[in-house]
Amino acid sequence: MLDLTKIPDAVRSEGSVSRRLVLAYGAALAGLPLVSSRLTAADRKIVFESNPFTLGVASGDPDANSLVLWTKLAPDPTTAQGGMNPEMVPVSWEIAEDESMNKVVFSGIAVATPQLGHSVHVEVQGLKPARWYWYRFRAGDAVSPIGRTRTLPEPNAEPDSLRFAFASCQNYEQGLFTAYDQMAKDNLDLVFHLGDYIYEYPGKENQVRKHSGPTEGKIKTLDDYRLRHMQYRSDELLNAMHAQCPWFVTWDDHEFDNNYANDIQEEQRGFKPRTERVDFLVQRAAAYQAYYEMMPLRKQTLPEGPDMTIYRKASFGRLAEFFVLDTRQYRTDQPNGDGLKPMSEEAWKPSNTLLGKQQRGWLDRSLLESTATWNVLAQQVMFAMVEINLRDRSGFSMDQWPGAAFERMALMRFMADRKVPNPVVLTGDIHANWVNDLRVDDRQADSPIVATEFVGTSISSGGNGTKEVKNLDQLKAANPGVKFHNQERGYVRCEVTADRWTSDYVVVEDVKTAGGAALTRASFTVESGRPGAQLS
């Protein structure tokens, strides 16, 4: 496997990550064995001294006939190698039509390789559409927990309803993942995780829990990222929720580095200079590989060095089309030095982008091709152009869509002009709940509403939040599109039919102690064909 600490100086001296570096990564990761053709019978008699399935099981990226089953062998998740020796291990898998695993429909053997941290990604083909399945893995004499998963309806099917949740921002140190305990009781079809699955910050004392790894400086190496992911996945509530239903995942910034933009590191504001971009991309390659290893993603997502294509779409019949976006990897630098700033000329530059040219073209084409009743952007940062007024500063967030205002308005105008049916935007990142009606220009309150944005708060980031927000009336007066805003912790549960979309804002009153109560704080409905959210 490619050692990130030994990138040749000749490659570094080019001032950017060259094709040679990408090809080196490709050579290291391509052609990894998916079946056990090279494993002997003796290899199958592995005996583990402790449970290798400490990180549980997961499934993801389903379509009508296939999905991904995931696990990772880690008898000791407190070490970077998970307690595994650097050797290939056969892992058998089976998927059944019943929870007791008596009606097995497909089975096989995959190989857990040290190159990918002994993670397993099995793409099961030939499944029936709109069907629940159960699955498990075996390695040596150990058997994994049983997970539940499902396929999506056929693209032309017209399902009656869809029930899913979306979540983001789960800082291990700042709170417990109590929200997942309630989510597991919701009987969901799907989960969308919109980023900040881990946080890259060093471990601190006097927190709810303490990060593994360095106590000074952010994590940077492949071992660092692997350890951090394993610590998070060792959480029993998160672990259990992954086993409940398939997930669609995308990243934001903390899976790599706070507020990064493509190959540009966050400004450190005088504390230290910006990292050389080549070194930063070497670090990005490590972060992206660890992310792939730990998520139920298809092989087509396998990173090539510092590049990993994660934007994609999924059809829940003709009821809903989901467009899972990436607003980090291809974006331009935040204008105006990032932060909360007025909408200056820098923010309006047509060259500013969060999507990049290729992803934006793919999104436009996909929206035009969609025949779904609801068209859903599952993405990271707030889409609404909300002016924040605080005592010591005010303005629009340059890290969010106002930082690419021209692109944002062009996308809204595209959806309005092309009559894209029922656009809905799902958002994370901001550690607060929002409901926003979206216009081409949100500052023009008398212009037509084009879409609705549901912004979900954090699972735990920021610790216990607040139900009441100071100066909320003032904020709403300055931003007429804002229908709801608070700063509690939790997630958003959505019920979708052909006639209406309902979003329930589920909050947890205390994430710093176990057993915090969960309740629905507010519910909003959008009627099909009538843009704009209404309090239910």
Image: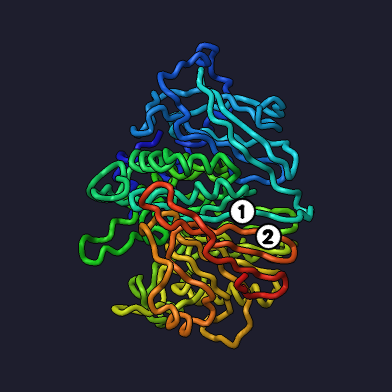
Which residue bears the numbered disc 2? 496
- Between the C-alphas of marks 2 and 1, the distance is 9 Å
Q: Residue at x 43, y 67 (%)?
A: 467
Q: Quadrant of the C terminus?
A: bottom right
**At which x and y percent is residue 483?**
54, 75
Residue neighbourhood size for the residue with mark 1, other residues' Cα within 10 Å, grouped as few (<14), some (14–19), many (≥20): many
Tell whether label 1 touches label 2 (CB within 8 Å). Answer: yes
**At which x and y percent is residue 400?**
45, 69
Left or right side of 247 for 5: left
**At which x and y percent is residue 51?**
44, 25
Where disc 1 sits, the SS reads strand
**At which x and y percent is residue 180?**
50, 48
Q: Nearer the viewer, residue 506 or 284?
A: 506
Left or right side of 127 for 191: left
Q: Residue at x 46, y 29 (%)?
A: 73
Q: Nearer the viewer, residue 209 or 124?
A: 209
Q: Say the numbered circle drawn on residue 164.
A: 1
Against 334, residue 143 (above or below) is: above
Task: Quadrant for residue 522, please give it.
Answer: bottom right
- Which of the marked residues, 2 or 1, is nearer the chain's N terminus? 1
Where disc 2 sits, the SS reads strand
Residue 194 in view: no
Badge 2 amino acid:
Val
Residue neighbourhood size for the residue with mark 2, other residues' Cα within 10 Å, grouped as few (<14), some (14–19), many (≥20): some
Residue 123 in view: yes
Badge 1 amino acid:
Phe
Q: Residue at x 46, y 53 (%)?
A: 517
Q: Residue at x 40, y 47 (%)?
A: 514
Q: Quadrant of the N terminus?
A: top left
Q: Nearer the viewer, residue 475 or 332?
A: 475
Task: Quadrant for residue 214, please give it.
Answer: top left
